[in-house]
Amino acid sequence: MYTGMKSWILLLLLYLSSTLLLIHAQCPDFTNLSDSNVTCQYGNTQNPMQYTGVVVGRHTVITQQGTDPNTGHQLPFLPPGENAVVKLGNEQVGAEAEAITYKFIVDPDRAILLLKFAVVFEDPRHPVPDQPRFVVRVLNSIGQLVDSCAEYDVTAAGDIPGFQSYASGWIQWRPWTKVGIDLSDYAGQYVFVQFVNYDCSRHGHFGYAYYTASCINNRLTLDGCEGDEFTLTAPANFESYTWDNGDTLISSTYIAGEGTTNANCLITSVTGCQFTLSGIFMADSTIPIVSTTIYDTICEGDIYNDHFFDLPAQYNTGTHTYRNTFFNSGNCTGGEMTTTLHLTILPRYHHLYDAACQGDDYNAYGFHYTNLQTGNYTDTLVMVLPSGCDQLTILHLTVNPSFILSNSISGPTMVCDNEAFQYVLLQAEGLATLYWNVPVGVNILTGQGTAAVNLYFTNDAPNPAQIFLTGTNGCGSGSIPIEVIHSPTYHYFFQDTLCEGNTYHRYGFNLARQDSIGWFRFINSYITSQGCDSVRILQLLVTSTPSLTALAQPVEICIGQRSTIFALGTSSGFSQDGIAPTVAIGDILCTDSSIVKPTAWPVPGKIAKGIVFYVDNTELHGWAVHLQDQGINVFWTSSGYYNNDFSTIPNFTNARDAITDLNGYTNTQWMYYSHDCPVVQAIDFVNGWYLPTVGQLSLLFAELTTINASMENVGGTPFPMGQAWIYWSSTEHGASNAWVVTNTGEVAFSSKRSRFRVRSVFSF
């Protein structure tokens, strides 16, 4: 539930006690915001009821047909049968929130409130309290829900039942939905119908909703008859119908027999609210002359068969309203006369839940036991009450065994850092709770609260690391330690450059002559004296060696004179005059490492590899983006490493700092060699492609017009314009989240178990 709920409920209660609104005996016009029974309010996501008044653009009445563009024009403004709706909120951002509250007296003859609403959210994948949100609820005079199901509270997410997705999941929207709530128990009393809308609390994403409502008759209607067959119809627009004859459609046919014939329909709303409408066929002479109201009482669990009502056993204590509509079995008429029953169900059953320990005596609530043995017991006491309903007190007693905890934990006592190891409690009898206590630097991957846990040791853990398992069952507690010595693993990364045709001897690598141009990776693996991995990784760029000719001008000089020497050469990186060509954004990086201008494309024998989106101050080197996405629905990390912080990758907790991260290659290296990361597995890291950072993606998406033109020129997949696609970056937010960037320039962080697009980049 939203953290700001208490504050606005308090405001609502103050409003209920102080308002002088005119109370309408009939259902109000929900699209008339100037009516005296309507209160429009606005504020922020912490307090949507901070101010009172209609705000243009935030409390809006729509009367014209159209479709919502944020849903790809799939959502119509007006649902079938309506000529006006209210739009609460808008497409603007800024942590805004709005509310509208309606106050009216429930009409006994139109006691079913029919709500219609549609919802549109941006889904930035923030933590739940920060997400856009929409609430509709029906409250009584003291601010309580009229029923436990009389509330629809939904927060933006990627898998909401009944919602549809648009713009690669960035937009979540619900089509027009109908919810019916029976307010018969509040006939003649006033109620409040309230709609509340919230933007994202971080000021960057919107949420809004459309709605309207009406009050409809709470009776079954006679739809037709043929001989002894009568067809009854329930009110429309509900989720499901269950008739007592087994039918599940909105209408059902009954055969009227001699005497009286009852018909009952259980009606269920989309929120789970249920109520029953009843009808009865009888001879003309026995139909009541006028509608009547009856007050009666039964005990919890009893059936009710008086006054032509045929109700099953009633277990919902309190006073409830039932209606019988009379139909003439002789001439196929009726429906005007009703009997309204206000039935009070007095409590009979009182359930008690308690626990004791093996061997104890138990003396409480009138129950007496000695020397209890382990197990679950149920017992009942009967008490005669003045109300006439014998109270049944039912005891549910759990007897726990004495505390037993095994004397050892199974698992290695010598481990390597940056690897997962399992520890298991060999035997645990009768334990209600288990808790693994680990020091800082030891991460729990899975298994907290169970007898088997997977731990991950980092360089920051104390050595030795003390791991404790504690357990309790209410009849004792205990703790078992295990001491673990951990040894470091080493991953060294080196990046270097070499001219073709040369050998390489640095950083412990001895490479033969390199005659191929491009990026190449070499790995040397060792085992330390403690048995842990030591890996050296070399990322080597082999460049072409230019063929140079020295030319002196003048060729012949005298002693004391000067001559200018020019270098002329040819290679993929030099022009004929020895001056390196200037690289620009939008240029085409080819598979042979050459650069081709878009105006010169295509070039025979050249194959496009990527499109340049950044050039450094040398005007020779920079970054290029891949021609295609490497995935459209990819996790950042696998479930085994979820909630695991990469200690070698810096964390950025706000977008302002995250955009400064430009170390995509280094981030990807750590992800590639340290953990199971689907975003890295999707790309060709071995051949130099890597996952860009927030800063690199921001630079890329700032040049989309130029990039897309070159993409189309070489047959790549352009990024959409005006439609948000979400891409993973290699920039980490923390243990559970990483940063994403949309091609429209928005930066946000999301759970590493979310699914987004991946497109790699290349350094040249």
Image (spheres, rainbow, N blue to C red):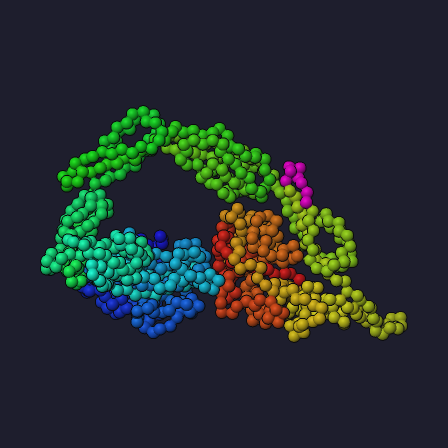
Q: Residue furthest front?
A: 227
**Number of callouts in the render?**
0
- Quadrant the C terminus occupies: bottom right
> Most prominent secondary structure in the magenta stretch?
loop
432 or 670, nearer to the observer: 432
> Which quadrant of the structure image shows residue 703?
bottom right
Q: The magenta stretch spans which residues?
A: 525-532
The percent position of residue 697, horizontal first and vertical second, equals: 56, 62
Which quarter of the picture shows residue 44?
bottom left
Q: Position of residue 670 (x, y in %)?
A: 60, 50
Q: Is residue 624 visible to us here?
A: yes
Q: Which residue occupies the foreground of this view, 718 or 252?
A: 252
Residue 5: x, y in percent? 32, 54
- Rendering coords of residue 472 (x, y %): 41, 33
Q: Residue at x 45, y 34 (%)?
A: 470
Tell me what residue is drawn at x 87 percent, y 73 percent: 555
Q: Can residue 435 be found in the magenta stretch?
A: no
Q: Residue at x 75, y 66 (%)?
A: 571
Q: Is residue 206 above or below residue 474?
A: below
Front-most of 271 and 120? 271
Compared across the picture, whether 452 is left or right of 375 comes to: right
Q: As drawn, is 288 to the left or to the right of 56?
A: left
**Residue 277 appearing in the image:** no
